[in-house]
Amino acid sequence: MTSTADLCDLYTGLFASGDVQILQGAWRWFSNIRAFEGQIMTLEARGCNAELRDLLAQQGDARILVIDAGSDPGALLGENLANQALRNGWGGILVNGNVRDCTALAAIALPVLANGAWPQRSMNERGGQIEAPLAIGGTCLSPGDWIYADEDGVVLSKSKLKSS
């Protein structure tokens, strides 16, 4: 994977046009794997995780699931759902919200990036929207966009970026 810093250097023109952006946020890694790249699937969770459970039961095809928790502080992802995501081939998960089971998440070979940790889970109800456009950190994300993340930050692109 090309580092996000190198992508910023390679694609300065696309940053100027807005086709490539940096996803602002106080991101924190909750896994030992601290990088991912791939096409995104979005979920506006609204503090509910029933739709998340449905998505992670499907084949991920190395996609990155980007979740917006809304204003609910409850953890949307923990050990069980992360293991399910790994088994079903998801390439990583970014949560604009909280996760839990941090020690267990660190031992799972699935890159997980989130804003923080919260011991209480979210509601096990329906109320989210799959493949919704999201606005995170002043950036609009759409299903099918490409995301690149490492310890330097998160880069979002409307199309797949090449390393040369």
Image (cartoon, helix red, strand yellow):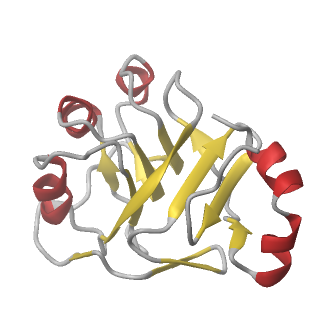
Q: Quadrant of the N terminus?
A: top right
Q: Quadrant of the C terminus?
A: top right
* 143 on left or right of 122: right
Looking at the rendered structure, the number of numbered marks drawn on it comes to 0
Q: Position of residue 114 (x, y in %)?
A: 51, 49
| Residue nearest the viewer, comparing 118 with 140 | 140
Q: Position of residue 99 (x, y in %)?
A: 40, 45
Q: Position of residue 88 (x, y in %)?
A: 18, 36
Residue at (56% x, 67% y) in the render: 159
* 22 on left or right of 35: right
Residue at (26% x, 50% y) in the render: 121
* 8 on left or right of 67: right
| Residue nearest the viewer, comparing 17 with 92 | 17
Q: Position of residue 57 (x, y in %)?
A: 10, 47
The relative height of residue 124 versus residue 151 in the rendered view (above or below) is: below
| Residue nearest the viewer, comparing 87 with 115 | 87
Residue at the extreme front of the image, as rendered: 164
Residue at (74% x, 46% y) in the render: 4
Quarter of the image for residue 43 reads bottom left
Residue at the extreme top of the image, as rendered: 107
Residue at (22% x, 67% y) in the render: 48
The relative height of residue 53 versus residue 91 in the rendered view (above or below) is: below
